[in-house]
Structure formats: structure tokens, C-alpha cells
Amino acid sequence: MRFAFTEEQDMLRDMVRSALESEASLPKVRRWAEAQDSAEFDRFVASQGWAGLGWPEALGGQGGGLLEQAVLFEELGRSAAPSGVLLAANAMALSLLLPLASSPDARPGVAALGAGSETAAVLAPAGQALDHRAMSAGVRCVDGLLSGQVPWVLAAAQVAHWLVPVREGDGVSLWRLPRDAAGVQLQPRSLIDRTRALADVQLSQVRGQCLGRLDAAQLEHAQARVAVLLAAESLGLARRMLAMTVEYVGQRVQFGVPVGSFQAVKHCAADMLVDTEAVHSGVYFAAWALQEGEADGLMHAWIAKATATEAAVRCADRALQLHGAIGYTWEHDLQLFYKRAKLNLELGGPPRHYRERIAAALALA
């Protein structure tokens, strides 16, 4: 059974899709990727108010909840938009800041991020989950001065501020510092997905502002939100690759007939459809469960991240196979979706990590 959207959520999807088709077409995405500069897209996102989507209006956001954010990220995946800054700020940074929103030190940052007037990224390895062990292993704080090295930080060079987690017992203290502060060094990393940017960050006695403390449960909930949004974007990628593939095999002629008429091709495309439909309801049910505070919300988020990102990778591999030789070329747009699907599999932690969490929660391990 498919997840049922409200009329407002369907309208949001149509609006986001129309805006992306107009202002973030694939030729533009390709141009931004080749230049490795998404500033134009980031300004467009700010003008649309998407940075605050899913966050309370009282905190500077646009209202809605995680379901609305999931709709947005599915459409971002469908367009292969360079969503790294939005993911870093709207998903990761705000998820960590929200529990601290009542703090006088954190509230201005929450409002600025929600309004899109400021961008921030979490200084944590992009390939690991947001838990107190992994995300704070590389930074220490002595007398308010931060030092250490953090590899593979998403959008590190594209934002104005960083949120730096420093381990404290079974939680972290969260520190804020400007990206251009004295004592900061950046080393950009190369990715196959050029629509996203990572960098290694070196801190040497950098003065930060402490915003508050997050316990393990708050970190786990923040990670679950990020997991759902990565799953939603992966669902959008899979849907678009399926549509591109069906269109291509209906046009490509071999032995005098469209290759889409061959049974083997039909079966492969049908497997792609099964994958996308299988994860659709799981992704949106997880978003709903977390949004409504359901007891099993975390479990569904872990399942959604593992299954949706793997499904997108399977769709990417099948799409590449069915496109034949042209699918392997730089000139074909399939490469944009293929590379993003491969990256999303690892962002926020690989599927193995989430399956281990599921096994532990069910007392299977």
C-alpha cells in the first residue's frame, strides 16, 4: 500500500518540481558540477525558503515537518540538484540545533539557518553517523579553544559557520565557529560526484562559542532525521533513473525493434520498479513516525536509510546496463544520478551500520 499524502504535500511536490525544472535543469546541474560551484543554486534555495522547510515558524522556519522535508529531498534527488549545502544546513545542522533552540546562545543560529540567511555545516566525517563516538573523535577543547582534524566534512568550504561537536561522556557539547576563523585550515577532497563537496578540516586552537550539550538520545534522533532525508533523496534518484531508462529502451532500436520489447530488458526494468515502489512507503512512513514521535520511529529510519540507498544503487547499476555504451559516457546525464546514488550509500553511514543498529535493537546481536 502506498503512503497517502495530503493535498498540501502534493501541492508542495508540484511546486518544488516545477521550480527545479525551471531553475535547476540538468544542463545547469552539469555546469555547476563541472565548475564545482553550487553558489547559484544555493542562492536559489535561499530565495525559495527551502532552508527552513520542516522547521517551526516560531524558530524562523517555514513550518511543516519531516514529511515535507522528505518530499523536498525526493525532488532534489529526482533533479540531481547540488543539495550538499541544504543537506548540511537544513538536515544536519538544524537537527542538532533544534534541541538547543530554547538556549539564548543557540536560538539566533537556529533562526538564521531556518530563514536561509546563514549556512552551517557539522564538523563530522560525512561517512559516519551522528553519534557521540564517531562524530567527535577528532576534536578536543581546552579552555574554549578547539583543536584537531576532521576528515570528509560535507560542504565545509561552502558554508559560513561550522558546528563542532566535542565529546562529553555519552553526549557532545556543540560549539559554533566561523569558517574563516584564525587557526583553520581546509583541504578539499575530490569526489566522483562533483555536485557535492567534501573537505578535511584542521583546527589549531580556534576560539569557539559553546551552544549547549546534546545527549546520546538527542544525537540519535538527529541522525535518524538525516537518514530519512538521504533515503528520500535516494528514492528520487531511483525514480528518475527508472524514467530515463524506460524512455531510452523505448527509443533504442536493435534488430528492427525497440530494445524495450525484449523480455530480459522488461524484467530488468521491472526489477527497478519493484525497488522504487518497495522503498516508497518505507521512507515516508519513517518520516511520519519520527515526526509524530512514534516509539518505533528510529527503527523505521534505520530501515529506510539502508533499503533506499541500496535500492538506488541497484537501480543505478541496472540503468547503466540498459543504457548500454552511451550510459558510460560523460556526455549522458545518467552519470549525475549514478554517482549520487553511490555516494548516498555511504553518507551518514553505510547500510551495514544501520543493520547493526536494527539487530541490536531487536536483541539479534
Image: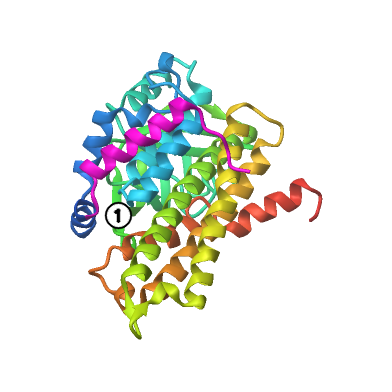
- Is 323 above or below relative to 222? below
The answer to whether residue 237 is magenta is: no
Report the side of 144 relative to 183 (left or right): right
**Is residue 54 in view from this perspective?**
no
For the residue pair 146 and 60, the one nearer the viewer reads as 60
- Is 111 above or below relative to 42? above
Specify the quadrant of the image occupied by residue 257.
bottom left
Place of residue 292 in the rendered image (x, y in percent of width and height, measured from the top left): 62, 26
Query: In the image, what residue occupies the spot 33% across and 42% down?
Result: 85
Place of residue 238 in the rendered image (x, y in percent of width and height, measured from the top left): 45, 56
Q: Residues within 10 Å of mark 1 (few under 14, many from 20)?
A: many
The answer to whether residue 22 is magenta is: yes
Query: In the image, what residue occupies the spot 35% across and 54% down?
Result: 198
| Coloring applied to the structure | rainbow
Quarter of the N terminus within the rendering: top right
Specify the quadrant of the image occupied by residue 31.
bottom left
Place of residue 84 in the rendered image (x, y in percent of width and height, measured from the top left): 35, 46
**Is residue 326 in view from this perspective?**
yes
For the residue pair 256 and 51, the one nearer the viewer reads as 256
Residue bearing the label numbered 1: 195
Task: Give, as a single range, the part of the protein colored magenta.
Answer: 1-26
